[in-house]
Image: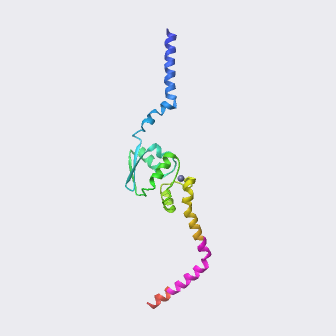
Amino acid sequence: MWAKIASSSAKKEKDTTDKNDGPKDKSKKDDISDSLDDLITLNVGGIKHQSQISTLKKLKNTRLTNVADIAKSSGQREFFFDRHPDLFPYILNFYRSGKLHMPTNICGPLIKEELHYWKIDDKDIQQCCWVHYINHEETFDMIERFEKDEHHHKVATEAVSEKASFFKKQRT
Ligand SMILES: [Zn+2]
């Protein structure tokens, strides 16, 4: 009798343990809905986005990681950023998916500026979007090289125009 009870309670315990340890049961709550206490509203340029503190903490040392820390410690749940609203979904998606894609209809320097603001390294941009992004760097390099080649012409032109403006000043 005792042995029977003991063994059945042991069996019960074992079943419960299995249930708690099973990854399927552990994530059951998350499958239905993510926790609401963790919810955070990010108003970017007037457009509201909602995410979770835990999502924003997936990346390290970014602006939104700090926001998540502040939200957690202060209880503040809404934050406003006066930044480009069209790029922000791509930024947020990086936290959700771990992949940083960027729209190809937005100029590279603008993307660079936004990534700098959100403290995200542009080296994290996925290969598929990298070619578009890096295009502007190559264009700038080309312009720089062109200007170097033309440097002596430029110096001469500047000297002349300086002289010209000096004379102009003297005459007026
Ligand atoms: Zn891409």
Residue appearing at x 49%, y 17% in the figure: 9
* Left or right relative to 44: residue 133: right
Residue appearing at x 57%, y 70% in the figure: 143
50 drawn magenta: no
146 drawn magenta: yes
Looking at the image, the residue that sits furthest to the bottom is 171
Residue 35's place in the image compared with 133, above or below, is above
Q: Nearer the viewer, residue 48 or 7?
A: 48
Q: Nearer the viewer, residue 113 or 128?
A: 128
For the C terminus, the quadrant is: bottom left
* Left or right relative to 126: residue 45: left
Residue appearing at x 52%, y 84% in the figure: 162
* Left or right relative to 144: residue 52: left
Question: In this picture, which residue range is highlighted in magenta?
Answer: 145-164
Chief secondary structure of the magenta span?
helix
**Percent x, y of residue 7:** 52, 14
**Percent x, y of residue 133:** 54, 59
